[in-house]
Image (tube, rainbow, N blue to C red):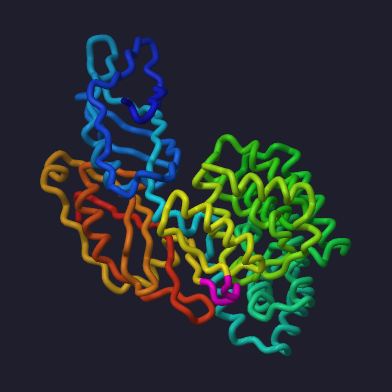
């Protein structure tokens, strides 16, 4: 049985020539581990380059591909594309369902990428006292376009959460959203509003802005992330409607929807600005019709992404009864499922998503890969792109392919698995980090 569908699109125009597209001769299924009786599915949209012998040469994917899937894909063989009587290399579009064990279901909830500017701002904010914070506000008033000072301000307000600082973050969120609605920080917990601020000028202005953005049917993933980050507290039903329509990014949309349903079902009204765990709830909101609908959807679903993203969102829950109900449902599919339904939100561990340029500065051990002799002899160069998990101990625990030539893959992956980093900390505690790593191969090395 074929495990994926292949749609062929020309990557270039062969003007005046009839091109016969490639066709599959051999399609190899991955070898799946025993724990994949129940699994998650990521729908990868990939561009696969096939050489003039019908052999897969390289791939670029919007979703990281695990080693067992890569190994199988490399064994596929095609009847080469032909331009007249000549075999030619082409690029095709590949819809590839990637299976992942439920042991990897942790961390399916909402994430946002910590930029270098934000992390630098937080370093500065740690040394501020109230007098320094007041001086920072005055500097922003003198120069409203000072983005870095605004990031220092929001970091300070996240570290010292209070009603007044929540209002300050809301004010900063309004400025960023009006200037650049795709700004990364707007998708993070610091920009998630407290419902108690509803009716204030900044709250209502942001509410209307994000509704307008969603009504415009924007295909921008960042806008969808940022808009639903705000509206999941203010207008969860509208945010859910937008996510259900996001058919171009179904996996990502379901991950966000699971968390949104969990918040609505529990009547969450505020989150911890540093970690995103629910921090306050309103039982009246939890009894509203949409909250009842959300609860029913989660407790009967067989969509693993929806269920486990909801469970991930409710860690350290302010609603332990519902959290335990979600956990019981998850254990029906994966007996080892776990969640700290009774812990304090502030103590929850975090997995950060950080850009490769940021974590590169923390690299302390990076053995170079061996240039594969066959690839070198054939003149194959290029970059192999990975997504990797850096553990709280600084060691690589997982490496999966995002793109690059297959001939360079094995040596690149073997090298990265030996890399070590200075641990990344959040509020002084080591955390796991998801990041991207690029390995370059050039013949003049």
- Is 93 placed left or right of 206 in the picture? left
Residue under the image location 30 percent in, 19 percent down: 22
Up-down relation of residue 64 to residue 8 (above or below)? below
Residue 171 in picture, x, y percent from top left: 78, 67
Q: Which residues are magenta?
A: 342-348
343 drawn magenta: yes
Of 16 and 431, the residue lying toward us: 431
- Is 401 placed left or right of 168 in the picture? left
Residue under the image location 26 percent in, 61 percent down: 417
Up-down relation of residue 376 to residue 322 (above or below)? above
Residue 57 in picture, x, y percent from top left: 25, 35
Q: Image quadrant of residue 324? A: bottom right
Residue 21 in picture, x, y percent from top left: 33, 17
Residue under the image location 62 percent in, 43 percent down: 220
The answer to whether residue 214 of the structure is visible from this angle is yes
Of 281 and 18, the residue lying toward us: 281
The answer to whether residue 383 of the structure is visible from this angle is no
Residue under the image location 61 percent in, 54 percent down: 259
């Amino acid at each position: 049985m074929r495990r994926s569908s292949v749609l062929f699109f020309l990557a270039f125009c062969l003007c005046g020539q009839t091109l016969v597209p490639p066709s599959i001769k051999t399609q190899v299924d991955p070898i799946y581990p025993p724990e994949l009786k129940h699994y998650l599915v990521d729908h990868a949209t990939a561009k696969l380059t096939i050489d003039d012998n019908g052999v897969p040469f390289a791939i670029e994917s919007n979703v990281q591909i695990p080693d067992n899937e890569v190994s199988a894909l490399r064994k596929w063989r095609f009847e080469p594309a032909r331009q007249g009587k000549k075999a030619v290399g082409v690029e095709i579009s590949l819809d590839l369902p990637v299976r992942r064990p439920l042991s990897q279901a942790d961390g399916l909830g909402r994430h946002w990428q910590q930029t270098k500017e934000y992390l630098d701002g937080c370093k500065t904010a740690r040394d501020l006292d109230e007098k320094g914070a007041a001086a920072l506000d005055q500097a922003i008033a003198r120069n409203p376009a000072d983005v870095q000072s605004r990031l220092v301000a929001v970091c300070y307000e996240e570290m010292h959460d209070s009603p007044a600082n929540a209002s300050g973050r809301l004010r900063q969120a309004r400025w960023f959203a009006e200037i650049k609605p795709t700004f990364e920080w707007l998708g993070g917990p610091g920009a998630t509003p407290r419902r108690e601020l509803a009716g204030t000028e900044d709250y209502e202005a942001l509410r209307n802005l994000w509704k307008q953005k969603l009504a415009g049917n924007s295909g921008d993933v960042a806008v969808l992330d940022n808009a639903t980050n705000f509206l999941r507290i203010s207008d969860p039903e509208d945010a859910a409607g937008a996510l259900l329509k996001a058919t171009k990014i179904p996996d990502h949309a379901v991950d966000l929807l699971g968390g949104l349903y969990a918040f609505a079902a529990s009547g969450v009204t505020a989150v911890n600005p540093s970690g995103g765990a629910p921090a306050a709830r309103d039982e009246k909101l939890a009894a509203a019709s949409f909250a009842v609908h959300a609860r029913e959807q989660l407790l009967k679903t067989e969509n693993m992404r929806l269920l486990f993203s909801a469970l991930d969102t409710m860690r350290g829950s302010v609603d332990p009864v519902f959290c335990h109900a979600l956990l019981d449902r998850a254990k029906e599919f994966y007996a080892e499922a776990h969640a700290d339904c009774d812990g304090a939100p502030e103590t929850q561990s975090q997995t950060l998503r950080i850009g490769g340029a940021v974590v590169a500065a923390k690299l302390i051990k990076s053995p170079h890969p061996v240039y594969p002799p066959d690839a070198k002899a054939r003149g194959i160069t290029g970059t192999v792109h990975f997504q990797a998990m850096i553990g709280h101990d600084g060691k690589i625990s997982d490496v999966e392919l995002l793109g690059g030539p297959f001939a360079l893959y094995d040596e690149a992956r073997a090298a990265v698995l030996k890399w070590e980093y200075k641990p990344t900390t959040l509020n002084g505690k080591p955390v796991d980090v998801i990041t991207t790593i690029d390995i370059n191969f050039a013949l003049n090395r």
